[in-house]
């Protein structure tokens, strides 16, 4: 059995943590021939060779000036050419990189390859000669026919190389060796364009101190705040027609068009047909797991640009301008699409609740009481990475850079210190309420309201 693992070196020089998890997952499959695949500058060759010491037989580096500046679709196209040459039974990808944070490339790659695929894999349950069975973040058990592609969550810690381990081989392929159409590669072949970037200072807020007894009243007031804010930032000039796939994205779509056509969540081929028939200016999806997967599939099928996890949309009456955080949330990028219709996934409130209550490690002694508070407020539970690592709640609840990104109207952080990797996952929430006994906790810098209290005492 041959498994190709797509990997990327991060800006810190280390392997992207989701890719590390995918690599470890491949190494755990008995008698598998594991091949690493990466698109990067020539300098990444030594990095890939060092990774082969962990068990991969060889690494393949795609490097050419024509590949530089690629967005997700152009990256998926280039990777697909290499995968076709390697003819694997399975392709493993990490959920996302920490550079773009889009979680699009794996889905687009599978679509271009015409492989069966699933995202958000939490465990690999069984691998047979003709199929692979996995469990997803949504607790679904899925069996895929091979060849198949899966994207893996942060479910494994990558092993260290053995003392006597030796590197495998490294093969370098350029555009000519891949038989690539350079018009579809790199910056030239990328349908999305970054128009401008700025430092992201939107997360920090001015904290107002309140007592715990004011919590319910504050939550009630905050529940309606987001709709008022959306109405205030609607574009003066609007697009003629925008499709919202599902009800969740309707409000964001309404910022840029007075004519929003809602289509129900359905299979990608049906969505493609509706888009072709309707000829909209833009197509907007929510950012839940299904929507991200469907949007990337549709974009690959139609060769359209797709901007992920947008926090704001604007229009000049002709084009859609999309704003999204990048580089672990440190910058905000303004993006436009060179293709029509423009496509975007947008951050919306939680599917199940307009309030998320996140448990930090600081609330470990009052976990049952905090859960009861969440039930009382009709709030969805979340967790920090430290809380998950210490088994207070399962990984599926984790909010942050290596968990999930949320943007509910109300976000309550209980016993959360406010590490930057957590802030990235919740900074676009409507109203943030932090409860912590440490007045110097960084979370208060990102909160609209602060309650200085020991959660064990007040509950």
Image (cartoon, grey):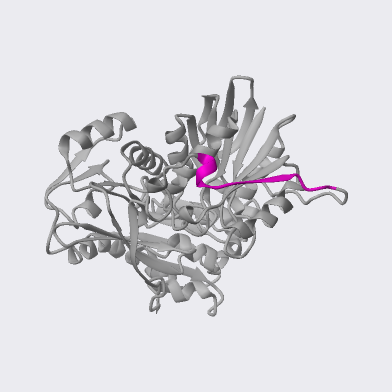
Name the residue: 63% across, 60% down.
43
Q: Give the residue at the far front of this rendering.
A: 176
Q: Residue 231's x, y, as percent?
A: 18, 62
Q: How many marks?
A: 0
When the figure is inspected, residue 254 is found, relative to residue 155, above or below; the finding is: below
From the viewer's perspective, tell me whether residue 459 is left or right of residue 211: right
The answer to whether residue 419 is seen in the rendering is yes
From the viewer's perspective, tell me whether residue 159 is left or right of residue 39: right
Q: Residue 299's x, y, as percent?
A: 34, 42
Residue 168 lies in the magenta stretch? yes
In front here: 369 or 332?
332
Name the residue: 52% across, 56% down.
370
In front here: 373 or 84?
84
When the figure is inspected, residue 288 is found, relative to residue 436, above or below; the finding is: above
In front here: 243 or 423?
243
Residue 330 lies in the magenta stretch? no
Q: Residue 399's x, y, as percent?
A: 50, 56
Query: What are the residue bounds of the magenta stretch?
Result: 165-178
Among the 4 quarters of the image, the one containing residue 57 = top right
Look at the image and tell me in which quarter the N terminus lies: top right
When the figure is inspected, residue 364 is found, relative to residue 185, above or below; the finding is: below
In front here: 13 or 254?
13
Q: Residue 311's x, y, as percent?
A: 33, 60
The answer to whether residue 394 is seen in the rendering is no
Name the residue: 36% across, 45% down.
351
From the viewer's perspective, tell me whether residue 149 is left or right of residue 296: right
């Amino acid at each position: 059995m041959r498994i190709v693992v797509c990997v990327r070196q991060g800006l810190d020089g280390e392997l992207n943590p989701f890719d590390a998890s995918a690599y470890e997952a491949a190494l755990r499959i008995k008698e598998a021939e594991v091949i690493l695949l990466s698109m990067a500058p020539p300098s990444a060759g030594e990095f890939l060779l060092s990774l082969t010491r962990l068990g991969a037989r060889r690494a393949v580096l795609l490097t050419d000036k024509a590949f530089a500046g690629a967005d997700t679709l152009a990256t998926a196209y280039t990777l697909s050419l290499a995968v076709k040459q390697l003819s694997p039974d399975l392709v493993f990808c990490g959920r996302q990189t920490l550079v773009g944070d889009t979680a699009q490339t794996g889905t687009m790659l599978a679509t271009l390859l015409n492989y069966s695929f699933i995202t958000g894999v939490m465990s690999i349950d069984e691998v047979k000669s003709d199929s692979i069975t996995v469990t997803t973040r949504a607790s679904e058990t899925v069996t895929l026919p091979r060849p198949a592609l899966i994207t893996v969550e942060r479910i494994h810690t990558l092993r260290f190389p053995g003392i006597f381990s030796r590197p495998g081989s490294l093969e370098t392929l350029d555009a000519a060796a891949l038989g690539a159409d350079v018009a579809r590669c790199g910056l030239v072949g990328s349908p999305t364009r970054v128009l401008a970037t700025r430092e992201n200072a939107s997360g920090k807020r001015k904290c107002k101190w309140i007592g715990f007894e004011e919590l319910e009243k504050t939550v009630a007031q905050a529940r309606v705040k987001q709709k008022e804010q959306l109405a205030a930032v609607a574009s003066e000039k609007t697009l003629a027609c925008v499709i919202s796939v599902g009800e969740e994205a309707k409000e964001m779509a309404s910022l840029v068009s007075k004519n929003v056509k809602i289509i129900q969540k359905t299979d990608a081929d049906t969505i493609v047909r509706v888009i072709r028939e309707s000829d909209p200016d833009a197509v907007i999806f929510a950012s839940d797991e299904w929507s991200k997967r469907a949007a990337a599939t549709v974009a690959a099928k139609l060769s359209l640009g797709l901007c992920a996890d947008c926090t704001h949309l604007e229009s000049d009456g002709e084009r859609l301008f999309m704003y999204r955080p990048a580089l672990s949330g440190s910058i905000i990028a303004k993006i436009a699409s060179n293709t029509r219709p423009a496509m975007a996934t947008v951050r919306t409130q939680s599917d199940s609740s307009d309030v998320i209550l996140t448990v930090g490690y600081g609330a470990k002694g009052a976990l049952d009481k905090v859960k009861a508070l969440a039930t009382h407020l009709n709030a969805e539970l979340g967790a920090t990475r430290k809380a998950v690592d210490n088994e207070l709640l399962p990984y599926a609840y984790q909010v942050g850079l290596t968990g999930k990104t949320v943007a509910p109207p109300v976000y309550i952080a209980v016993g959360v210190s406010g590490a930057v990797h957590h802030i990235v996952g919740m900074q676009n929430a409507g109203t943030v309420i932090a409860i912590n006994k440490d007045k110097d906790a960084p979370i208060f810098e990102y909160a609209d309201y602060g309650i200085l209290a020991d959660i064990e005492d007040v509950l």
